[in-house]
Amino acid sequence: MAFKRKTYKGVYEDTNQYFVCDAQSDIQNLPHDAEMGSMAFVIEDSTVYMINSSGVWVEITALPGSVNPFGVFGRG
């Protein structure tokens, strides 16, 4: 399912939220009504989660050596 990002006078608004969790167990406490594409970084094991359109936090992965597309979580 695709969604169009919100715009204001032709400029895209970043409505995503970014969370940092100490442990994997903290993922269950994140809001399930966050904007699709919001992300969470888990310090315990350096995993990254993204919420999907169903409100489920899903662990995402990237290929080793790839550029970090998230910017907010470090230099990649």
Image: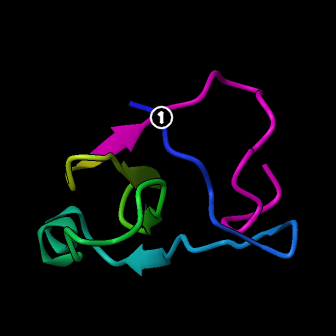
Residue 67 sits inside the magenta stretch? yes
Up the image or down, 47 lies above or below 27; here it is above
Magenta extent:
58-76
Secondary structure at numbered mark 1 = loop
Q: Is residue 40 left or right of residue 76?
A: left
Which percent across, then down, holds residue 53?
A: 31, 47
Location of mark 1 (residue): 2
Residue 75 sits inside the magenta stretch? yes
Task: Identify residue type, mark 1.
Answer: Ala
Magenta region, main secondary structure: loop
Which percent across, then down, holds residue 9?
A: 86, 75
Which percent across, then down, holds residue 43?
A: 43, 69
Up the image or down, 66 lies above or below 26; here it is above
Q: Quadrant of residue 60?
A: top left
Furthest residue toward front: 9
Which percent across, then down, holds residue 40?
A: 43, 65
Look at 21% across and 56% down and name the residue there.
55
Q: Is residue 61 left or right of residue 57?
A: right
